[in-house]
Each structure stands twice: as C-alpha cells, then as structure tokens.
C-alpha cells in the first residue's frame, strides 16, 4: 500500500473532524519553509482548528508513532518546518483567532496561527505597539516566531520575541495541554517551563496559544542612512550615536547588498557617494533637541573621517522608503538561492569577526559572491553566499557545507553562535556542537525525552 | 530665471490627526510636523529645473510663526538657495497667503512660481488660483508634468476626465499634483550647509498685507466612527442580517 495513503487513512479514521489534505500542491507548499535545499515530501498535512484537536492528534501520533512537523507561516530560514521524509505536517493556518485584548495588562492573547502583522495592527489600533518586526512579518505566525525566538530590526530597543511572551499554551508529546505562566508579570514558583518552549523549534511540543506583552507606542522617529568606509568606523559611529540618542534600530549592509536591492526594486541609489558599507538607523526624535543632537553627532563623526555621506528622513513616507533599502535585501537575493548564515557574536567582537570571516571567504570561495547585512547593533551578521548561475544546486550545497565548516569553526573561536535568530532546524543541525557543549546537548536531549517521549516532534531538527 | 516655491508646515501625512476635546482645533502638541507633501514635490521640480540649467535661483517662502523656519531649513537642505519667512502669528486663509505671496513676487520678480495643488491640512486648493488672478498671470493647476521651452511651459494637468496638456506663457503659477516626481532624500551634509544659507524674515504687516477674518472655523469634529463589521456564515444569514437592518 502507498504509505502516504496509509498515514492519511489513520488521520481520517482516528481524528474525525480533523481537516486532512494529501493534495500534491498542498503537500508541496506546506512541506517546506523559505529554504530551497530539500524536496518536500510529507505524507499528509493536517489543519487543526482548536487546542482540543491538537491534543487529540498528538495522542494519535504518539500512539501510532507518526512524526509531526509543526508548520507556521513557513518563512523560516533553517529548514525547521521542512517535511522531507513522509512526516505529517501540522499547520496552524486554521488557528487564527484573536482571543483577548486586555488594555490594563497591555497584552493580547492569540492562537498560534495568527500572523505577526495582525498582532502589530491590533496593537496599533489600541494605541500600543508590538515591536517584533522583520521583512516576513506579513506571513510569519506567532507560533513560528515563538518557536524560533524571532528577533528582527527592533531588538536593540525592545528585545526578542522571548521578551514579549507572558503566557503560553503548549501541547506536549503526551497530548497534555500545559498552561504556562498565564500572563503573569511575576511568578517565582519554580522552573519557568515557558522559556524552554521558546526557541524549541517545534521539537518539544506544539504551541497553540500565546499571551503577548505590548509596548508603549514609539515616539516620533527619524531614520538615517549612512555611508561608511570600514567596519571599525561603523562601530565607532554606533558608539557615538548610541551615547546621545535612543536608537531603536541599527542595521548594516554592504555595497553588494545595496546593488541587489536597488536592482530588484528599481530603486535609485540613496546618495551619489558609493561606499563600501551602509548603516540604517532609527532613533527617537520627539523634538528639535534630538534633531540638533543628531546633526552634532553627524558633524563629529564626519570630522573623524568615519562617515562618507548620509541622508535623513523628513517624513513618515521617507522613513518607509529608506527602510526598503534594508528590508528588501533578503528578498532581492532569494532567487539565486543564497546559502544563509545567521551568526552572532558579542557586539564588541563584530569588527574582528567580520574581518577574519571576510578574509576566510576570500581564501576559500573567491569565486562566490558574498552579500553581508545584519542587525549589527545586536552583534548579528547575516552572511549570504550566492549560488553562481552555472553551478548546480547539489555542488553548491556541498561547497556551502565546506564553507560552513570553516565559518563555524571561526565562530566557535570567537565565542559566538552559529544561529542568532533563524534557528538550527535542519540546515545547521550538523554543527550544533560548534555552539553548544556536549554536556549541554545531552541535557537538551534529556529535556526533549521528557516532553516528547515518543520522539514524534520534528525528528532530525535541532538536536542530533 | 528665479523660481519661487511656497512651503507650508503641516501635520505629517502619516500621523493620525486627533481633534481637541473642546473642538477648538486639531492637537499638534508633540505631533510630527512636515513640509506639505505637495510643496515638497513643487520644490523637487524647481530643483530639477535649476539642475537642468533652466533656472539660476530657487527661493522657498513660507507664511507662519517661527516654527515654520524648520520647514524652510528643510527646503534649503533639499537644495533651495534662500528662504523667506512671512512672519505672522495669525492663522491665514488662502486669500491672505496669496496677497502676501504677491508682495514677495513684486520684490523678487520670479519667472515661475510653483506651489502644491493644496495643503493637506485645510485641503482648500485656492492659494495658487487666487495668486494667479491677483498677479494677472496664467495658471496651470494640478500639474503632473512640466516642460520649459524658453518663455512658455508645456504642462500636463490631471483632470477628472484624464490628462490635459496646455501651454502657458511665463511667468506663471503652477500647482503640482502627486505624480509629478519623487522628492529626494535630504543629505546630512546639506543640512549643515543649509544652516548657513540666508533665511530672511519679513513680517506680514511690513508687507502691507492685513489679515482678513471673513472666514472663521467654529468647530472641529472627527468623522463619525465606522460601525464594526460582522462576519456571516452563509448567504442565508447575509440576507437575514440585511433584512434585520431594513436594507432589503
Ligand atoms: C525575508 C525574510 C526575512 C526574515 N527576517 C528575519 C529577521 O529579521 N529575524 C528573524 O528572527 N527571522 C527572520 N526571518 C525568519 C522567519 O521569518 C522567522 O524565523 C519566523 O519567526 C518564522 O515564523 P513562521 O511562522 O514562518 O515559522 P515556520 O517557518 O513555519 O516554522 C519555524 C519553526 O517553528 C516551528 N513552528 C511553527 N509553528 C509552530 C507551533 N505552532 N508550535 C511549535 N512549533 C512551531 C516549525 O516547526 C519550525 O521549526 C526572515 C525570513 C524571511 C523570509
């Protein structure tokens, strides 16, 4: 018998009322995330529409030993939501209810399938702000954000998704529903299990509901796009601006990144001077005082020779236009496809790391184009290696592995992490040991065994 | 040729405007203020004309309190050569603004006056037209394209039925529409330079223009709140809901 039919038949028989699909286009679309290195091959995709259905389906899976791949908005960049081995994809597309908004708690409670941008809009409508923001926010889901501890462009001021999660409902591998922390600000009553599920990449349980803290609406702000000579001067500019302004974002990209984003979106260069590096930074600018401060800082940094050129937004429209130069990069190179690295080091170690990494790339892959950008204010570098047009995907992948090997060895030396915010998933799994000790990995495996004794959640992802 | 460009300080286009509780006006406390977007386009067009070698000087002018110097400085940073503030603490209506601009025209003798087609606060769309009449020169309103040919200009206008192309003798008043161009970003070094560019302040009184108060706004009110929509399960329920509301 066709094993796919088999699995689908189990779902239909054991979980009446659960929406199950085995249609080829659905298997293909829901069997993969944003990465394109694996052929999707799930046996079925199920679409629960309530926590009860999730509990029931997990019990069935545990009993029948069916592997489950949790799937959110499928914008993940590490293959975490990829189903390539006949697993069942559990999609949260039908769990999109906003359950509660509480103005006194300043929180919103949503089902896991609610899209990030929906939470942002909801907060805005209520005079508040949901600060987790990045280019894929129109598709990514809260469940996926929590499972990867998503960061984005406002981490500098507002922190990561972890800092927003006040409560979490999860279904463990035994099919139990846990109600974790229940939205409390303070709760000193033992282990905070909620935090184990944040960044667990679907390996410990299924997130079905979350209560998220909202922030005060941001003050009026302005955006600077700056051109710089070197990484050293970039860090000095960062230091100088941060000393006197409240920065909510500080991002960098290279001239190659600018080239791609301009070409893909038919954007003009932001200014005539071509520079090796660019920074986009947003800061609170409630009054003329802040405006004067930024001019003073610009003058000072220019006199020091750190800055080559720069523009400043004059209105909200220009804020959005300037952000396009940064936000559009990822998409502008996605067709190559790029081999993405999401590296993290201490902020102070960024210049050394980048310099050594750049040297390494020139040595081991001078034939590849490398596009750099990242959340430099958080010590987070995105290194994208573009596949040359005439190289096959397989050859590119094996070369990428070699590059990873060397890159992660260097990352380990500097005491960094091989994944800042995209997760380990499937793509980075072979190198987990470069960032976590053997003892740590063993503890993680033991924790997984406690929550997921049958090993049904996302096998082959994150942990060896 | 000199080009004169009008600039108004308004609440930023993207700010959700809030009416004061007593209905006496709009809350501008701590609210982001910007150059009226149409005026920004007007200035961009003037700068492009100058950069193409068809004008020697671009002058920005704004009527208002000293706060509007901020928007004039923005104009200077974008590339205008000098600025004039027509100083007044009164709130002006289009006719007064047009009279004041006429005085500036008499002093400066520009070959072209470019304004926004309207300001996004009052949405009056009157100043340009009134100015052309007072000055007794041609007007080309709602322009989306402008080509200079010596002492005439060919202007494409956005009208209800589509596009209209007209030719006007210069000097003339042109008011610009949204599609004319995309204004540039302001370069930081140019903001520094703008601090040293001339900004003349002339009081409205000194221009011999009096504020006429034949129009007073008595009350501001926000538009009525839209009722929340409901989702219906099927057409039967849709029909029922429409019936319940007496709509069918
Ligand atoms: C253009 C672009 C820009 C991006 N920029 C950023 C950025 O700046 N910062 C950043 O952090 N990320 C970024 N990402 C990555 C991605 O958007 C985030 O990782 C996002 O949080 C993933 O959410 P998702 O719903 O798409 O998850 P998916 O890709 O569907 O899944 C991600 C992981 O979460 C698991 N998962 C999903 N839903 C659940 C659930 N309900 N319960 C348990 N596990 C679940 C999956 O199994 C998988 O392991 C970017 C992606 C793109 C395409």
Image (cartoon, helix red, strand yellow):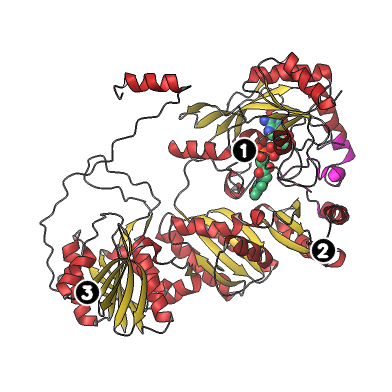
The chain ID associated with circle 2 is A
N-term-proximal mark, 1 vs 2: 1
Is residue A252 covered in magenta?
no
Look at the image and give the residue range highlighted in magenta.
A414-441
Q: Which residue is mark 3?
A: B138
Q: Is mark 3 within 8 Å of ligand 1?
A: no
Is residue A425 covered in magenta?
yes
Q: Are the two marked residues, 1 and 3, in contact with CB atoms closer than 8 angstroms?
A: no
Element type at mark 2? helix
The nearer-to-camera label among 1 and 3 is: 3
| Dominant secondary-structure state across the stretch colored magenta | loop
The chain ID associated with circle 3 is B
Percent coordinates x, y for residue A169 in the rendering: 65, 24
Can you tell which quarter of the image residue B88 is in? bottom left
Percent coordinates x, y for residue A375 in the rendering: 65, 54
User: Which of the image's four quarters has the N terminus of chain A?
Assistant: top right
Q: Which residue is mark 1?
A: A163
Q: Which residue is mark 2?
A: A361
Q: Is residue A308 above or below residue A200?
A: below
Q: CA distance from mark 1 to mark 3?
A: 62 Å
Please tell me in which quarter of the rendered image ligand 1 is found: top right
Element type at mark 3? loop
Q: Residues within 10 Å of mark 2 (few under 14, many from 20)?
A: some
């Amino acid at each position: 018998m066709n094993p796919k039919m088999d699995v689908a038949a189990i779902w239909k028989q054991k979980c009446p009322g659960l929406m199950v699909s085995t249609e080829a286009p659905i298997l293909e679309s829901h069997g993969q995330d944003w990465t394109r290195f694996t052929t999707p091959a799930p046996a079925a995709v199920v679409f629960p529409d309530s926590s009860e259905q999730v509990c029931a389906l997990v019990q069935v899976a545990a009993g029948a030993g069916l592997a489950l791949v949790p799937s959110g908005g499928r914008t993940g960049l590490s293959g975490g939501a990829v189903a390539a081995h006949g697993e069942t994809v559990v999609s949260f597309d039908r769990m999109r209810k906003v359950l509660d908004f509480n103005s006194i708690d300043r929180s919103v409670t949503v089902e896991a399938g609610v899209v990030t941008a929906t939470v942002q809009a909801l907060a805005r409508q209520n005079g508040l702000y949901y600060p987790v923001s990045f280019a894929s926010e129109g598709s990514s889901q809260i469940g996926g954000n929590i499972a990867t501890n998503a960061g984005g462009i406002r981490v500098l001021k507002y922190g990561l998704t972890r800092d927003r999660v006040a409560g979490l409902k999860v279904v463990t591998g035994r099919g139990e529903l846990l109600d974790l922390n229940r939205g409390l600000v303070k709760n000193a009553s033992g282990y905070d299990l909620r935090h184990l599920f944040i960044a667990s990449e679907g390996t410990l349980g299924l997130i079905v509901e979350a209560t998220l803290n909202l922030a005060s609406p941001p003050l009026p702000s302005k955006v600077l796009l700056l051109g710089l000579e070197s990484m050293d001067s970039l860090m000095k500019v960062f230091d100088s601006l941060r000393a006197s302004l409240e920065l909510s974002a500080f991002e960098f990209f290279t001239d190659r990144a600018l080239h791609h984003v301009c070409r893909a979106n038919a954007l003009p260069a932001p200014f005539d001077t071509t520079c090796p590096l660019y920074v986009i930074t947003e800061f609170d600018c409630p009054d003329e005082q802040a405006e004067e401060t930024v001019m003073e800082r610009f003058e000072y940094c220019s006199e020091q020779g750190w800055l080559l050129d720069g523009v400043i937004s004059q209105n909200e429209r220009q804020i959005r236009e300037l952000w396009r130069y940064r936000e559009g990069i990822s998409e502008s190179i996605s067709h190559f496809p790029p081999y993405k690295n999401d590296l993290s080091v201490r902020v102070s170690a960024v210049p050394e790391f980048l310099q050594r990494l750049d040297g390494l790339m020139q040595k081991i892959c001078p034939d590849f184009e490398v596009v750099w950008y990242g959340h430099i204010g958080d010590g987070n570098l995105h290194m994208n290696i573009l596949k040359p047009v005439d190289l096959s995907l397989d050859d590119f992948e094996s070369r990428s592995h070699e590059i990873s090997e060397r890159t992660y060895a260097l990352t380990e030396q500097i005491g960094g992490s091989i994944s800042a915010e995209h997760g380990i998933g499937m793509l980075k799994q072979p190198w987990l040991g470069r960032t976590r000790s053997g003892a740590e990995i063993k503890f993680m495996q033991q924790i997984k065994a406690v929550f997921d004794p049958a090993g049904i959640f996302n096998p082959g992802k994150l942990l060896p | 040729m000199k080009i004169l460009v009008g600039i108004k300080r308004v609440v930023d286009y993207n700010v959700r405007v809030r009416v004061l509780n007593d209905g006496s006006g709009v809350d501008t406390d701590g609210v982001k203020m910007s150059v009226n977007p149409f005026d920004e386009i007007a200035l961009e067009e003037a700068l492009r004309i100058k950069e193409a070698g068809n004008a020697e000087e671009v002058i920005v002018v704004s009527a208002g309190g000293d706060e509007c110097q901020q928007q004039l400085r923005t104009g200077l940073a974008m590339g205008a050569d000098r600025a004039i503030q027509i100083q007044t603490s009164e709130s002006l209506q289009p006719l007064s603004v047009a009279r004041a601009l006429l005085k500036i025209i008499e002093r400066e003798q520009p070959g072209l006056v470019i304004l926004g087609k309207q300001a996004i606060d009052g949405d009056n769309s009157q100043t340009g037209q009134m100015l052309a009449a007072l000055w007794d020169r041609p007007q080309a309103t709602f322009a989306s394209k402008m080509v200079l040919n010596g002492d005439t200009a060919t202007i494409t206008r956005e009208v209800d039925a589509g596009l209209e192309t007209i030719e006007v003798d210069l000097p003339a008043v042109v008011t610009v529409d949204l599609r004319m161009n995309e204004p540039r970003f302001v370069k930081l070094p140019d903001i520094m330079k703008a601090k040293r560019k001339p900004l003349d302040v002339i009081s409205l009184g000194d221009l011999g223009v009096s504020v006429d108060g034949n129009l007073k706004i008595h009350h501001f009110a926000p538009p009525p709140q839209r009722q929340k929509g409901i989702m219906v399960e099927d057409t039967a329920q849709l029909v029922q809901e429409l019936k319940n509301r007496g709509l069918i």
